[in-house]
Amino acid sequence: MFRGTLNVLIVLIGLASGVAQLAEIPARAAQWALTAVFLACLLYFVVRFWQIAFVLKIRQLRAELLEATKALALQRAGHQHYLDAIQRISDREKPLFSETLEVIVTVGDDDETDRIVEKRTTTPEPLVTHRTMRPIVPTDTDRLTRLDEIEFKAVRPVGGTITPLPLEQTRLLRVWLIFDPAMTVPTEWEVAYRPRGLWRPLRERGWDQLVWEDRLPTASGTPSAFTRFVVTFTFPDSDQPPSVKERAGYGVFSDPVRDHLGRWEVVWRDEKPAGRRYVWDLTQAVGGP
């Protein structure tokens, strides 16, 4: 019947005035009534104006958010193209180095104390500026793994620094390591990280496995860049010693012994790596000592 708020205001004032005259309301009371109606209508105008302004602002912000989301998506896509290119280049490159590797695998008493340390001595042939690696992380869930979650650290004690950058943050984490300055002489360096929950299945059921791929031939034609490969497995203290077996029979093992902290230790070594796929089966007593 009425179009617009202004029409509503005119009708309300007219009705109030007519009612006041018909009812013979005193002039002063009628003035107060008209003033109250006018103020109410004015308040309504203010609230309505604020509401319209608020709606328009929300629409503007939504449009800006949509544009920012599109720009971020384009930026992420471009960033991913760079990461994919780096991975393809890395996959095609053959190692221009040889190295010895010692991995210390710590089976913790709980998820928080699982730890991996990889100690390497790399001999460039002739130069190493960067390389990629995959840390050992749990793969029994679909949850993404980030470098900061595993407290990843790369250390070069003498002669420079190592900058780790994530290339792939999925169930199989991949890291790009940049050496500054480049390696030109035999260099010792190591990485350490905490893959929390890595050995939870071993603690809960008493058995688990660890897989290591070494199948990237070198530029010199040898089947592996490793000249020596050693893995030290350490287990929590228990009355029953743990066991470690390499499924294909590669390498040799030491008998389980206790270290100075009372933890069990098993050392496996392969003095002549040949680009193999290693699978170690681990067992330990369930429930601790």
Image (cartoon, grey):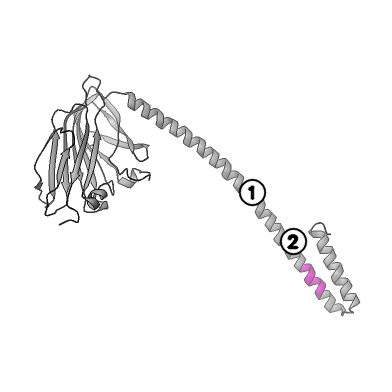
**What residue do we see at 73% from left, 63% from top?**
44
**What residue do we see at 20% from left, 34% from top?**
120
- Is 114 left, or right, of 46 in this rendering? left
- Is 34 left, or right, of 108 in this rendering? right
Type of the residue with mark 1 = Arg
Q: Is residue 225 magenta?
A: no
**What residue do we see at 27% from left, 46% from top?**
198
Mark 1 — residue? 59
Start-end of magenta stretch: 33-39
Mark 1 falls on what kind of element?
Answer: helix
**Position above or below: 53 against 70:** below
Residue 144 appears in which quarter of the rendering? top left
**What residue do we see at 79% from left, 68% from top?**
38
Residue 179 appears in which quarter of the rendering? top left
Mark 2 — residue? 45
Choose mark 2 or mark 1, whichever is in front. 1
The image position of residue 180, as x and y in percent, is 29, 32
